[in-house]
Image (tube, rainbow, N blue to C red):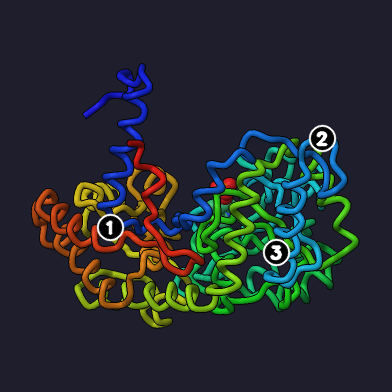
């Protein structure tokens, strides 16, 4: 094993990257916020676009040298407007956090209040006072949450929002098992004369596939998102909006507010992913949710406490498992990693802050990547069995890791893309 201090030569850095690839290609990745891009996307991510600047808009640049990129960005915008059915698309944010910051910047002034979910209830750090909202000088209030239904407690949330008078009602989050009550919040936003925003980072691919909810059609003013979770594109951010009157302030917030260059190789990769999702988005999204339900059911049958059994566990790509009686999220996720199963420990709504930071009660499991590698419900049952062997039966992790490796090695092709091919071929250095 190499140590960090050893990486003082090209060979060592390269071989460490190769080691990473070898290892992760033999793992089952259940991180709900991760996905894998297609070979075509990977190819353009390594292209010369990654060295270039293109401030400004397609065909109206502040830089020379962009005539080919202009075509790429113009077609990415056109594809995005049509796929997301959004009049306004801004694909320049470099991440979901930056897309959120741009929304805050465009729609609020320092001292305003945003109301959203807290972190243990599924909110993201980018809307906390210690995160992006604080960077904009916003005060943050939290929606009351219904732990049993794992959703915003609508009646109490409407009441609270009326009393705190926020500038933005922000829906969406990182724990996202069930659609949020957009229509009801639309009525409230109209009543209060405030903005309704929706953070789709986790569920953008499900929205495109028509299997979750459709926030723009249900009435939100603006959607901010990452482009690399259930939407299987390059890491980056995007803003969608159906209101022309917000376009200028959103544009300015992103450029020159938060970006100068918007990483052109990423835009080329996004254009390809948009094509892939146009063609396969429905089938892919359906399969992601079917797999999440199958994984939840299998784990439940094997004795795990999967949240929300009474609601069919999930309607999204992710499930939550309470592992507090098996040693807690840190311990279980750690053991699973030793067995080549990668997931993250996650606080559950009833965790106190200390538990949430140290050893939270839950693990969160997501199916975007295993689905993209072609797995289906029978593979989910097998994965649940491996998880049981580690977390309940205490089988030696090395032994399980070898079985998981053999299992994972059969799923090395990226599906739902225009050219199916080995996801790893671009990273064999010799
Ligand atoms: C992942 C996530 C983000 C941030 O995305 P990055 O692209 O990592 O900056 C924002 N909001 C939510 C709800 C997320 O889950």
Q: Is residue 379 above or below residue 97?
A: below
Distance from the alpha carbon under mark 2 to that under mark 3: 24 Å
Q: Earlier in the sequence, mark 1 or mark 2?
A: 2
Q: Which residue is mark 1?
A: 324
Residue 114 shows in the view: yes
Task: Give the structural element (helix, strand or loop) at label 3.
Answer: helix
Residue at 81%, 67% (x, y): give it.
87
Task: Tell me if the residue at label 3 has its CB under 8 Å from ligand 1.
Answer: no
**Between tags 3 and 1, which lies in front?**
3
- Residue 136 quadrant: top right
Q: Nearer the viewer, residue 231 or 253?
A: 231
Task: Tell me if the residue at label 2 has its CB under 8 Å from ligand 1.
Answer: no
- Residue 390, given in percent of the width and then of the height, sits at 16, 57
Q: Earlier in the sequence, mark 3 or mark 1?
A: 3
Q: Which residue is mark 3?
A: 80
- Residue 167, given in percent of the width and then of the height, sits at 79, 56
Distance from the alpha carbon under mark 3 to that under mark 1: 42 Å
Circle 2: is it few (<14), some (14-19), or many (20+) Cα within 10 Å?
few
Q: Earlier in the sequence, mark 2 or mark 3?
A: 2
**Between tags 2 and 3, which lies in front?**
2
- Residue 337, given in percent of the width and then of the height, sits at 25, 49
Q: Quadrant of the C terminus?
A: top left
- Residue 194, given in percent of the width and then of the height, sits at 82, 63
Residue at 31%, 52% (x, y): give it.
342
Q: Is residue 211 above or below residue 106?
A: below
Residue at 48%, 73% (x, y): give it.
284
Residue at 34%, 41% (x, y): give it.
428
Distance from the alpha carbon under mark 1 to that under mark 2: 55 Å
- Residue 405 quadrant: bottom left
Q: Which residue is mark 2?
A: 63
Q: Is residue 400 left or right of residue 190?
A: left
Q: Quadrant of the N terminus?
A: top left
């Amino acid at each position: 094993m190499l140590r960090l201090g050893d990486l003082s030569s090209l060979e060592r850095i390269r071989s460490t990257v190769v080691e990473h690839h070898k290892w992760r290609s033999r793992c089952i990745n259940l991180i709900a916020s991760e996905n894998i891009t297609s070979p075509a996307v990977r190819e353009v991510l390594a292209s010369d676009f990654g060295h270039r600047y293109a401030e400004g808009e397609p065909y109206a640049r502040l830089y020379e040298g962009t005539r080919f990129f202009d075509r790429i960005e113009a077609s990415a915008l056109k594809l995005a407007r049509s796929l997301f059915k959004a009049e306004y698309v801004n694909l320049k944010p470099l991440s979901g956090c930056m897309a959120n910051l741009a929304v805050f910047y465009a729609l609020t002034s320092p001292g305003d209040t945003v109301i959203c979910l807290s972190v243990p209830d599924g909110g993201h750090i980018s809307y906390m006072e210690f995160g992006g909202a604080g960077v904009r000088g916003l005060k943050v209030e939290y929606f009351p949450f219904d732990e049993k239904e794992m959703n915003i407690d609508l009646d109490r949330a409407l009441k609270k929002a009326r009393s705190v008078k926020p500038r933005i009602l922000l829906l969406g989050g990182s724990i996202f098992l069930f659609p949020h009550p957009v229509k009801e919040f639309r009525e409230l936003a109209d009543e209060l004369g405030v903005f309704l925003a929706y953070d789709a980072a986790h569920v953008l691919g499900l929205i495109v596939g028509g299997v979750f909810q459709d926030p723009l059609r249900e009435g939100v003013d603006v959607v901010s998102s990452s482009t690399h979770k259930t939407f299987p594109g390059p890491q980056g951010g995007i803003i969608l909006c159906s209101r022309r009157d917000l376009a200028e302030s959103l544009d300015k917030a992103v450029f020159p507010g938060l970006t100068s260059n918007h990483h052109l190789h990423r835009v080329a990769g996004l254009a390809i992913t948009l094509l892939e999702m146009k063609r396969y988005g429905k089938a892919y999204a359906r399969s992601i949710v079917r797999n999440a339900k199958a994984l939840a059911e299998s784990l439940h049958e094997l004795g795990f406490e999967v949240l929300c059994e009474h609601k069919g566990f999930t309607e999204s790509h992710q499930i939550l498992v309470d592992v507090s009686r098996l040693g807690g999220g840190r311990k279980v996720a750690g053991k699973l990693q030793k067995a080549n199963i990668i997931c993250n420990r996650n606080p559950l709504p009833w965790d106190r802050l200390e538990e949430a930071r140290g050893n939270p009660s839950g693990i969160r499991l997501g199916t975007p990547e295993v689905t993209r590698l072609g797995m289906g419900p029978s593979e989910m049952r097998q994965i649940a069995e491996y998880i049981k062997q580690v977390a309940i039966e205490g089988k030696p992790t090395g032994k399980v890791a070898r079985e998981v490796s053999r299992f994972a090695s059969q799923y090395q092709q990226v599906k739902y893309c225009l050219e199916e091919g080995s996801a790893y071929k671009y990273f064999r250095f010799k």
